[in-house]
Image: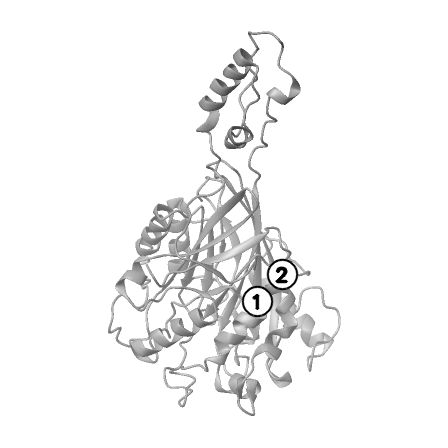
Amino acid sequence: MSRRHSRRTAALGPGVARAALAGLAGLALALALVGMSGLTMPDAAARSASPAPERVAATATPAPTASDVSTPEPEPPNVEFTLVAAGDVLPHSPVNTSAATGDGYDYTPLMAGVRDYIAGADLALCHMEVPVAPDQGRITSYPVFGAPVQLVRDLARTGWDGCSTASNHSVDRGFDGVVATIDAFEAQGLGYAGTARTADEAASVQMYEVGEAGAHVTVAHISYAYGTNGLPVSEPYSVNLFDANAADASPIIEAAQEARDQGADVVIASTHCCVEYRTLPTAAQESIAKQIAQSGVVDLYIGHHAHVPQPIVKLDGGPGGDGMWVAYGLGNFLSNQSSSCCVPETSNGVLLTTTFAVTPAGDVDVGVEWTATTVDRSGGHAVYALSGTDGGLGTLSAAEVQARHARVVAAVGTEAPERSTPAEHLATYMYRVDRSGA
């Protein structure tokens, strides 16, 4: 059985909270009959009951033997899994040049330095800031992007399982670019959230099933953006948008509730907003996150667009009332931005490692850690993990590594702990649920 990128055609619904109790009455009756007749209870009936009821005293002789009473099945286990998310995938022309080969592009060497962090997670979700160029003979960069299709292939090869795709650049290459992007994702077995090729596809939710023998959970990923840089959206269903100027989070909350209605046990919301190159979240960002936390339908909030790391905090609310973790902005994962064009913090990103534990009753415990990353522009746009590193990396001196790390620490804050080791698999399998036939 392949753990990653396997396809299903429909979500199975909430998994762990529904261990069968319907066999309880049947088992009690069967045990009574065993006591009356002295017959051995069939194995199939024994397997159908979980948990087993208390033993029924025998009323006939001879007394039942040990073989007459089935061994109670254990309670379904908690389902635990790890999720890794990263900042913006933003292939400027110099990034594409670093990935260029004699016959195309290869981005895997650029991401090799953090591959273990990504592939080590049970579920890895990136943020695809740009569309794939519908005409691969015309690759474009800032301000109107159209990426090589090999970028999507290499995201999959690096270990990503899916991406959020709603951003201010989603329609840079029109509706054809939206279609080309999703086609490329499906060809590589990657999930996508935030854009759609049809109205029916837009009405579906990107789901992933994560679990182990005897229990699983369904994880929903939703994605929304504040706008499209003024570019027209020819098909209104093609990109998920919300009004950031009004700080109106209702479309995101409604989508999260729809995900719950479609069977999600855990909901991840990726939000593309609000002001670039600013470490502190805006008032609108804070209001949007607070509304989502207090809605009680989202387990984790992941922010993008600022291109710099932003605070990671726990807000009041969440599905269980125990709070909701918010990563306001994960900065840049792969880009050409730096102090040369923007602000020094644009050289940095954050890998967010989240550990989920879901009980049979459906309660979700969420733990968050973060790892600082950076892009070595002079070293061919190689991405490195800064956390736990004492010396230099690539062309970066030890002093530069320390300075970049300090900037991330200052931005992220102290509520969540730093992680300097790759994520680890906690679940046995992960499947992407196919949206295309919805």
State the residue in front, 280 or 21. 21
The percent coordinates of residue 374 (x first, y second) are 61, 73
**Marks 2 and 1: CB-CB under 8 Å?**
yes
The answer to which image quadrant residue 238 occupies is bottom left
Q: Which residue is mark 1?
A: 159
Helix, strand or loop for disc 1: loop
Q: Residue at x 26, y 75 (%)?
A: 232
Q: Is residue 64 visible?
A: yes
Q: Residue at x 49, y 47 (%)?
A: 217
In this view, 28 is above or below 434:
above
The percent coordinates of residue 158 (x first, y second) are 58, 70
Of all residues shown, which one is farthest toward the right? Answer: 391
Q: Earlier in the sequence, mark 2 or mark 1?
A: 2
From the viewer's perspective, is 153 left or right of 254? Answer: right
Of all residues shown, which one is farthest toward the bottom? Answer: 102
In this view, 215 is above or below 231:
above
Callout 2 amino acid: Gly
Q: Which residue is mark 2?
A: 120
Callout 1 amino acid: Gly
Q: Residue at x 28, y 61 (%)?
A: 200
Q: Label 2 neighbourhood size at 10 Å, few (<14), some (14-19), many (20+)? A: some
Helix, strand or loop for disc 2: loop
